[in-house]
Amino acid sequence: MKNTNFLYILCCVGALITVGLRANAQNAGLSISWNGSAYVVKMEVVSGTTPLFLGSSQITIVTPAAMSTAGIAVTCASPCSPNQWVANTFVNAPAAAPSNNFVAVATLGGNMGSVAGGSSITLFTFTLPGGCNSDVRLFSNATDPNSSQMPGGQDFKNNLVNGLINFEFYNGNNNNNAVCAPAPLDLLAFNATREANNVRLTWQTENETEVSHFSIQRSTDGVRFEPIARTAATNQPSARYSYLDERVPETALVYYRLEQFDADSSSSYSPVRSVRFPQNPLRLSVAPNPASREVTLTVGSRTERTVSVQVVDAAGSVRYSARHSLVSGNNNIAISVQDWPSGTYIITLLHGTDRLEQRLVVQH
């Protein structure tokens, strides 16, 4: 008969909960996987409220007897603090499972964060001496020893409990056995949103392992993309990234995508996201930028008009202010910056309700 150990993980996470939380709206299962360096235990939410807090909950992991559990290292996933989990109880070879050992890992408590129905959240990761073993699995409430078979009636049943209303929302479903091949990187979200004349890109991943970096790419036609920035991968079980594109082309529609490069130089692409900008009868470009002696503002206008140009420094002091008459087409406005201190300035172009801004860097 194959010998196995039972690793018992107790999770007690207390927190405030929003008014109007309905117990019958909560329904979640569990999963376990291997991310290349640690086992990952997640709560898979079928339905729930946001935020969803864990109370006096516990999760039990089964491991082979050949794997020493004395060196277990458990880490609570963000937003928990790193030292909230402690392995503090060991039960060896109980009568109900003479070839098994049970190891209890308790937490001091903490907020697991907001979880919505149809999503998942990493509860914690753990490692054992010897690395990954595909026989590591989640406890089964239906078939594994129950509390009546354990010394002192100790209960190793999995449960998820809402801490404020003492409601059990674990549905008894989980995947069993951690496949030792790292799960593929999961791009949970990739979004592009307009912030004034800029675009904010955010993305979230899970199961990052042996990822080198992300190339942020931009296009004005949705076909030809060019890299505009590079972000190093953190290779964490769950990671969030953000990048602000401050040099968006003057076009009505801009497209973005990510190219993920792995350590072996292979790559893959994210879905394409687009951001629409309201068309402005004016266009503004600044060159050179950074500038040391003189900067030229190129203002494109569809018709003849008069505009106001103002340049302010980081403290809000006005360095330049003037009105300029424009002709249809491109107009060049030269501004001397050789006497300005090095730093960042904001150029503002105004005509009625139309407003354009560009950032200028002066370097001497």
Image: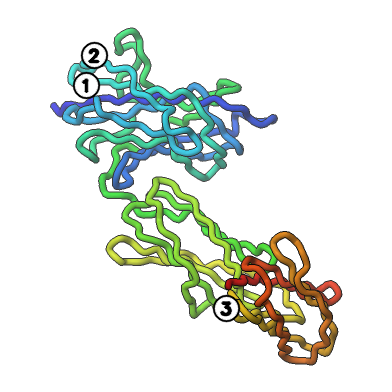
Q: Where on the picture, by quarter, is residue 138? A: top left
Residue ID at (63%, 80%): 293
Check the image and report above or below for 219 versus 146: below
Residue ID at (17%, 26%): 3
Q: Earlier in the sequence, mark 1 or mark 3?
A: 1
Drawn side of residue 234 relative to residue 177, left or right? right
Drawn side of residue 284 relative to residue 25, left or right? right
Q: Percent x, y for residue 193?
A: 62, 62
Q: Nearer the viewer, mark 1 or mark 3?
A: 3
Q: Percent x, y for residue 101?
A: 24, 20
Residue ID at (41%, 58%): 232
The CA span between labels 1 and 2 is 7 Å
For the residue marked with disc 3, what is the amino acid? Thr
Q: Nearer the viewer, mark 2 or mark 3?
A: 3
- Total count of labels: 3
User: Which residue position is annotated with label 2?
Assistant: 94
User: Which element is circle 3 on?
Assistant: loop
Check the image and report above or below for 363 versus 30: below
Q: Where on the picture, by quarter, is residue 244? A: bottom right
User: Which residue position is annotated with label 3?
Assistant: 220
Residue ID at (45%, 37%): 43
For the residue marked with disc 2, what is the amino acid? Pro
User: Which element is circle 2 on?
Assistant: loop
Q: Nearer the viewer, residue 139 or 276?
A: 276
Determine the residue located farthest toward the bottom in the rendered image. 328
Q: Nearer the viewer, residue 210 or 1?
A: 210
User: Which residue position is annotated with label 1?
Assistant: 100
